[in-house]
Image (cartoon, coloured by chain):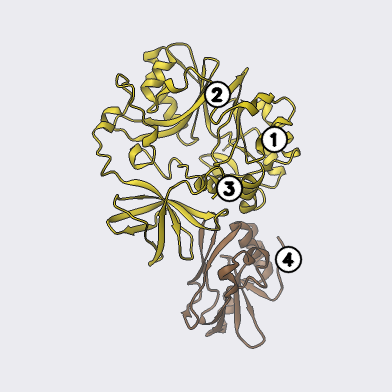
Chain colours: A yellow, B brown
């Protein structure tokens, strides 16, 4: 199994470790609910070094990203900023979701752990045409520090430039090989720091000393679910197109001359008939889980992600449903039809109900 | 392994029973099980009056992460369920052997006790 630079630290903190896509990762340190609440109420720190990091050298990198990325890289290529979007195949299906960071004429890309090899080959396949060299940065780790007090704690730390405080949402900058960005996967304010593995332990220990709570992948999942953020492999796979995955907003066709991979296929989709991802709140007792079936007045659906929401103190989920749904419907749990409400997938905004 | 009360018997799937002085049997899940599950957020209990066979599913326990079946260590008729768990399922985490019990049975075949593990054997089974 692969290990992050903090593997020993996780064991020393008493973490329960699991095999996550062949990486040994902490699922929780104490209680998943306590960890979740620490991020919503104060500040938590996550080791997410299992995620894949790629840099790019030489050639026409803007042309390269215009080709492979369904969002338009030109939105950030003149700014110090990150952009979220999808990597599509020729059929318009989602190979992965990713963030591309741009600052000081450098691009850095972060994508999911389980799709690392697939993506590497995909990038290499298209990079040739643009004379771009793809560099996998397995020497890099990622820390996320998230929560309403995250920035306050970060600026107290030695070796962190106070200008992180001035970053807008999705703003970022390089400091040598280190990247600091105001991004995250929790629905809270905070930073993601993508830095060499050799520098990780120092920042991790410093952050914990300053009161950041170590957070496992278990709470990461409930936090992202409350924020209505998709999880690749769960809420969308390479069998789904962006319009049935709440990612229509990341498809940028405003530059009509831009021919990105998957564009032709997307143009043939009738969006008025596409299924949609919707937020679901269970109004009866129980917990929504992946795979449970849904019925509504004009169609069906299926739960993609379901769990207990520590903030709302009830069960929430994301579901892919046929169009025509109104305010409520039924979910089938162990042969019983229970009441659900359909809501915006963003259960929380800025960490608030 | 934390302290296990000596009067309990176990299934290797982590359920415990206690034979009470009136001959009824109380069922719950072990401290080890609640620790493995993590924060428990929902428990679905059987109906009072329901007949349950030994080692068949009798209840569901759900942590934030996953749902798990709870198997009945003995056969019998359910005579009481722990209504407290409906609103405070987290009691299973804090008191698995006392306040966090699941249901009580009128057992129909006490010979089934012989199939259950002693606290020592259960402890050993957990370490495997």
Label 1–label 3 contact, CB within 8 A: no
Q: Nearer the viewer, mark 4 or mark 3?
A: 3
> Looking at the image, which residue is at 39% across and 26% down?
A69
Q: In terms of sequence position, does the residue under pointer 1 or pointer 2 come before the other?
A: 2
Residue that label 3 marks: A219
Kindly indicate the quadrant of the structure image that contains residue A272. top left
- Residue A107: give x, y in percent of width and height: 50, 20
* Badge 3: chain ID: A
Q: Which residue is mark 2?
A: A137
Residue A58 position (above or below residue B42): above
Query: SS of the residue at dot 3?
Result: helix
Q: CA distance from mark 1 to mark 2?
A: 29 Å
Q: Nearer the viewer, mark 1 or mark 3?
A: 1
Q: Residue at x 44, y 11 (%)?
A: A59
Residue B55 % position (x, y): 50, 72
Outermost residue to the bottom: B22
Q: Residues within 10 Å of mark 3 (few under 14, many from 20)?
A: many
Above or below, A52 relative to A34: above
The residue mark sitting in front, 3 or 2, is: 3
Q: Chain for mark 4?
A: B
| Distance between the alpha carbons at the discs numbered 4 and 3 | 29 Å
The residue identified by callout 4 is B3
Q: Secondary structure at mark 1?
A: helix
């Amino acid at each position: 199994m692969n290990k992050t630079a903090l593997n020993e630290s996780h064991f020393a903190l008493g973490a329960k470790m699991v095999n996550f896509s062949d990486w040994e990762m902490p699922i929780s340190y104490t209680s998943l609910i306590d960890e979740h609440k620490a991020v919503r109420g104060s500040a938590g720190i996550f080791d997410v070094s299992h995620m894949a990091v790629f840099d790019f050298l030489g050639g026409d990198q803007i042309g390269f990203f215009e080709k492979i990325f369904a969002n338009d890289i030109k939105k950030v290529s003149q700014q110090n900023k990150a952009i979220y979007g999808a990597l599509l195949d020729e059929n318009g299906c989602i190979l992965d979701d990713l963030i591309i960071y741009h600052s000081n004429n450098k691009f850095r890309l972060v994508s999911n752990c389980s799709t690392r090899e697939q993506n590497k080959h995909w990038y290499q396949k298209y990079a040739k045409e643009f004379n771009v060299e793809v560099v996998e940065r397995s020497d890099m780790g990622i820390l996320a520090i998230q929560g309403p007090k995250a920035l306050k704690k970060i600026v107290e730390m030695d070796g962190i430039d106070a200008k992180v405080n001035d970053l807008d949402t999705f703003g970022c900058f390089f400091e040598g090989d280190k990247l600091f960005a105001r991004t995250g996967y929790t629905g809270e304010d905070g930073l993601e720091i993508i830095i060499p593995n050799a520098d990780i332990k120092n920042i991790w220990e410093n952050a914990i000393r300053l009161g950041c709570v170590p957070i496992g992948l278990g709470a990461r999942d409930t936090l992202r679910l409350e924020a209505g953020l998709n999880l690749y492999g769960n809420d969308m796979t390479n069998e789904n197109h962006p319009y049935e995955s709440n990612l229509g907003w990341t498809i940028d066709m405003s530059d009509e001359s831009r021919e990105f991979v998957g564009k032709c296929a997307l143009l043939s989709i009738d969006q008025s008939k596409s299924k949609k991802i919707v937020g679901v709140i269970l109004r009866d007792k129980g917990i929504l889980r992946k795979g449970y079936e849904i019925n509504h007045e004009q169609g069906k659906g299926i739960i993609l992600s379901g769990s207990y929401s520590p903030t709302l103190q009830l069960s929430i989920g994301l579901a892919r449903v046929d169009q025509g749904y109104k305010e409520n419907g039924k979910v089938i749990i162990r042969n019983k039809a229970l009441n659900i409400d359909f809501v915006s997938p963003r259960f929380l905004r800025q960490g608030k109900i | 392994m934390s302290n296990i009360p000596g009067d309990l018997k176990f299934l290797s799937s982590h359920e415990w029973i206690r034979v009470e002085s009136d001959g009824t049997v109380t069922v719950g899940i072990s401290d080890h099980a609640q620790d493995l599950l993590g924060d428990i957020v929902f428990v679905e209990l059987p109906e009072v009056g329901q007949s349950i066979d030994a080692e068949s599913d009798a209840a569901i326990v759900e942590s934030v992460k996953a749902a798990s079946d709870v198997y009945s260590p003995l056969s019998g008729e359910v005579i009481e369920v722990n209504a407290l768990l409906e609103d405070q399922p987290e009691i299973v985490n804090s008191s698995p052997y006392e306040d966090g019990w699941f249901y009580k049975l009128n057992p129909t075949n006490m010979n089934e006790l012989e199939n259950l593990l002693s606290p020592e054997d259960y402890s050993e089974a957990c370490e495997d």
